[in-house]
Amino acid sequence: MSEPRKKITLPYLFKKVQDCEPITWLTCYDYPTAYLQEQAGIEMILVGDSLGMTMLGYDSTLPVTMEDMIRHSQAVRRGAPTAFLVGDMPYMSYQPSVETAIRNAGRFMAEAGCDAIKLEGGAAMADRIKGIVDAGIPAIGHLGLTPQSVSALGGFKVQGKDAHLAKKIIDDAKALEKAGAFMILLEMVPDRVCKLITERAENCIIMGLGSGPHAHGQLLIYHDMFGLFPKFKPKMAKVFGNAGEVILKGLKLYHDEVKANSFPARENWFIMPDGEFNGLEKLLKSKSTAKRK
Ligand code: KIV
């Protein structure tokens, strides 16, 4: 039997970068999926506020609350005890002030056993990152397509295709690194911009989502990988297996078998031994005779 995996730590992640070994990172929101990701050896797990769309059916991530995030993070931690677990700070859990940001980041660590938090935004959020890091909490920045600002960004689209916006993303990455972020996620940024940021990072791990092959590791949204999100399929999301199709087929089969009386079959129910059943019939009979008297 193979040894159980050791807990994934910050030094482990930096060692992977040093060894030029890409880091694996996936979103996850529930216990059974966390269990599978842990078995598969996935190194980092993000309990993303994308759960608002993938799990709760909202049109955006904005309605997600801290209570939603803590409940799901706790379930994921129970399923994946050794993965490096990242709690995603939901809308308005860090934007109002540095103090709000520190308090809510602390909740992910204390109540859900997270290893780090992630928040969206560049230089404007550097003081939140600094406050959180100064409080002893590892922090990750998120640049490029930042879904909490989807309205200001004009939709779910690539960010930094033009030179000026690309320069701003590069400057933002430096500001976050200076503020103490140990990792930055680049979402839907052109591959060349991602490469420049990765090359310029000094003490910061760069992760990519739809940003090409040059980052130190890759993140994907679990529901996109397995055909589990019906509303749309982003280009960056390779489908690694169509679990949605398999499940739908199984559900239709169940429906048909119940209608046709072919489920449940003999092996799907429990029997009572003849002697006990005869005894039960006698008990019922004697009760009804007693009532008639
Ligand atoms: O919430 C999330 O899953 C995220 C990813 C889109 C990066 O932040």
Image (cartoon, grey):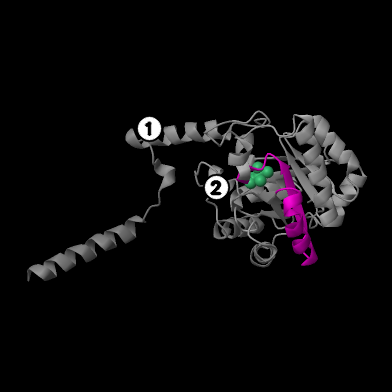
Number of numbered markers: 2
**Is residue 261 visible to us here?**
no
Name the amino acid, label 1: Asp
Q: Position of residue 183 (x, y in %)?
A: 80, 50
Which is more toward the observer, 97 or 267?
97
- 102 vs 10, left or right, is left
Q: Residue at x 54, y 43 (%)?
A: 60
Which is more toward the observer, 78 or 223?
223
Q: Mark 1 or mark 2, which has the lower sequence index?
A: 2
Q: Position of residue 37 (x, y in %)?
A: 68, 46
Disc 1 C-beta below 8 A from ligand 1:
no
**Is residue 147 visible to us here?**
yes
Q: Residue at x 87, y 56 (%)?
A: 11
- 230 vs 96, left or right, is left
Query: Ligand 1 appears in which quadrant?
Result: top right
Q: Give the numbered dot on residue 109.
A: none
Q: Residue at x 79, y 58 (%)?
A: 7
Name the amino acid, label 2: Gly
What secondary structure is found at the residue carrying circle 2? helix
Q: Which residues are magenta?
A: 121-148
Which is more toward the observer, 282 or 195?
195
What secondary structure is found at the residue carrying circle 1? helix
User: Which image quarter is the C terminus in?
Assistant: bottom left
Q: Position of residue 253 (x, y in %)?
A: 43, 32
Q: Is residue 112 magenta?
A: no
Q: Residues within 10 Å of mark 1 (few under 14, many from 20)?
A: few
Residue designated by label 2? 52
Residue designated by label 1? 256
- 86 vs 291, left or right, is right
